[in-house]
Every structure is written in C-alpha cells, then in structure tokens.
Amino acid sequence: MTKYREIKGTLIQNVSADPPASFEGQVWYNTTSNALKIDNGPEVSAWATGGDLNTGRQQMGGAGTHTAALSIGGNPNPLGPLVESYNGTSWTEVNDLNTGKFRHAATGTQTAALAVGGEPPDGPNQTNTELWNGTNWTEVNNTNFGRRDLTGTGTPAAALIFGGSPDGEFCELWNGTNWTEVNDLTRSYTIDDYMASSGTSTAALGFTGGGAAGTGATESWNGTNWTEVNDLNTARWGAEGGGTQTAAIAFGGGPYNTQLTVTETWNGTNWTEVNDLNTARIEHGGAGNTSSSLAFGNDQGIPTNPAATEEWSISGGIRTITSS
C-alpha cells in the first residue's frame, strides 16, 4: 500500500490546533479533536437548481436535509394536507396530513417530523399537532395557544415553537407528549411572525420576522431565556433557514411586496452575506444547515415557478476525514 510519506515526502503532522494558514492539499492530525483533516483549497459556496416539487405552493413547512427532506402542507387552500418527500434529486408525494394547514411550524427529519399550528383552509388558527413516523401522520396533543405564521426547531421528542400571530411572543416546549409554555421572546409581538429558526429545543436561534419592512432581529435561546444578539444585514420576513444556534443560514424573504435572493450565514456572533439564491423567494420552504440546504416553493403571486427547488452546498475549505 502506498504511504502518504511516499507521495508527499513527509509524514502527517500531529498538532494540537489547526494550522492558522494551511495550504491546499495539506493534511494534519488534530490531537485535541482527535481528527484527521485536509485543506481542500478555497471554500466555494453556491445555490444550484434541484428537482421541482410536483405541486407548486407557498407557506409550507420544511423538515430534514438537502438530500432527505419533507415539504409539509401549503397554500393555496386545497393543498393544505399535501406532503412531498425529496431524495436529493426529485420529489415524491407521500401520505397527507390528517388536517390541512399552512403558515405552520415544522421540524425534524424526513422520517420523524412534527407539523404544528398554522392556518387551516377554513377556520381559526390551529392548536393541532401531528407526528410523522416516515409513513403516516398521527394527531397528538395540541398546543396551548392557536397560532399561525410561527416557526419551530428541534425533534419530535423535544421541540420548541415560537413566534406567530396572534401573541407570537409566546413560546412552547414539547417533551414528546405535551406542550408547556416557557419564557417569551424579548421582541414585540408585532414583529415576531414569519420568523425563521435553527438549533434545538435547548439551544435555538430565531431570526427575521414580520412588519411591512421586515426585521433583521435575532434572538438566542439557552433553554430558559431569550437574549437579543446581532441583527442580520438585510431586514426581512418570510425567510427560511436552518442549522444550529452557533452556525445558521437564512435565505430569501423580503419586505412587503418584495422578494429577495439574499442569503446570510451566522457564525455564533455575526451574520455575513454569502452567495444569493438564483430565484427570489418569500414564504417558501426550507431544510438543512450552513453547509447544505434546500429552498423550495414560492409565493404564488410571484411570476416565477412556485415549484422550483434550489440546493445550497459548500466545497473546498478544511474538511475532517476521520474522527474518533
């Protein structure tokens, strides 16, 4: 077997921290993180066209990853129960929700997800919660407050929902069985609808939001309280996002009657604008994280394809080969 030393003329270095200025092709072993790493050259990020939804729509929920996602519910009204599954190439219709909805929260994976609250085709704001097991949806215990335009993050065993209308500063925590009201967002309820989110039920981020001009406001949740942190560079509502509390992505959205292609990433302290979406979107679906995300659907009033899907990916940069 050919050895690294025979190819490169040197041994792999053991270091306690990643080199501050590595070069393309350099390999090292980080003894602190117990990881073998490589510099794959300059980091390049971009959005690329993916497979269209079978049925174009807006105001749906999204869950999963860029290669294993769900599009849940949506508007116009007859599409409220509709669910589609993405395999990284194409969308396939799967079993419907029991109760049609749009402007709701969704979180989880392609095989284990929650759809919460929202606006039904006819009737008041929902308290309805449904659980997806990879095949079917089952109604479980309701939220304490009926809301639409809310967001959520976490898993079907431990989820957090917040924002929305009316009284969207309210937050509720799901323990796999029941919803419990927890501490409110710090922001005014007039700008906490149409938010996006990332993270877990104990370490979350809520960003963007309603109002005619939208907002760049960002709040961080530590499992007990919300704290205001640095704003996005571009104010908006109706955006989507994903990731963690310290590494998030926000894409699309806009102020009233405007749709944006703007994409920003969060490093735990600040937001940075990165490469734009190819198609301006608002009130669309999303799934994924900072290194690989999915954007799908669009406002029906925009003169572009409301079924269009885009995939976000990053190549190059420092990558972990193995860890132990």
Image (cartoon, helix red, strand yellow):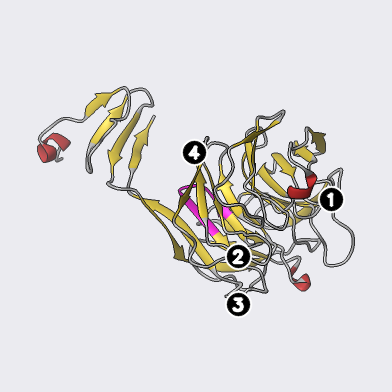
x%, y% of residue 221? 66, 33
Q: Quick one: SS at disc 3?
A: loop
Q: Quick one: SS at disc 4?
A: loop
Please name the residue that numbered disc 4 is placed on: 267
Instruction: Say whether marks 4 and 3 touch (CB < 8 Å).
Output: no
Relative to 250, residue 229 above or below: above
Q: Between 111 and 219, which is closer to the camera in this rendering?
A: 219
- The answer to which of marks 3 and 2 sits earlier in the sequence is 2
Residue depicted at x 10% and y 37%: 6
- The answer to which of marks 4 and 2 sits earlier in the sequence is 2
Indicate which disc residue 303 carries.
3
- The answer to which of marks 1 and 3 sits earlier in the sequence is 1
Instruction: Say whether marks 1 and 2 touch (CB < 8 Å).
Output: no
x%, y% of residue 242? 57, 48
> Label 1 is placed on what type of residue?
Pro
Please name the residue that numbered disc 1 is placed on: 166
> Label 3 is placed on what type of residue?
Pro
- How many residues crowd mark 3 within 10 Å: few (<14), some (14–19), many (20+)? few
Instruction: Say whether marks 4 and 2 touch (CB < 8 Å).
Output: no
> Label 4 is placed on what type of residue?
Asn
Please name the residue that numbered disc 2 is placed on: 259
Extreme residue toward the front, this view: 213
* CA separation in Å, label 1 and label 3: 30 Å
Instruction: Say whether marks 1 and 4 touch (CB < 8 Å).
Output: no
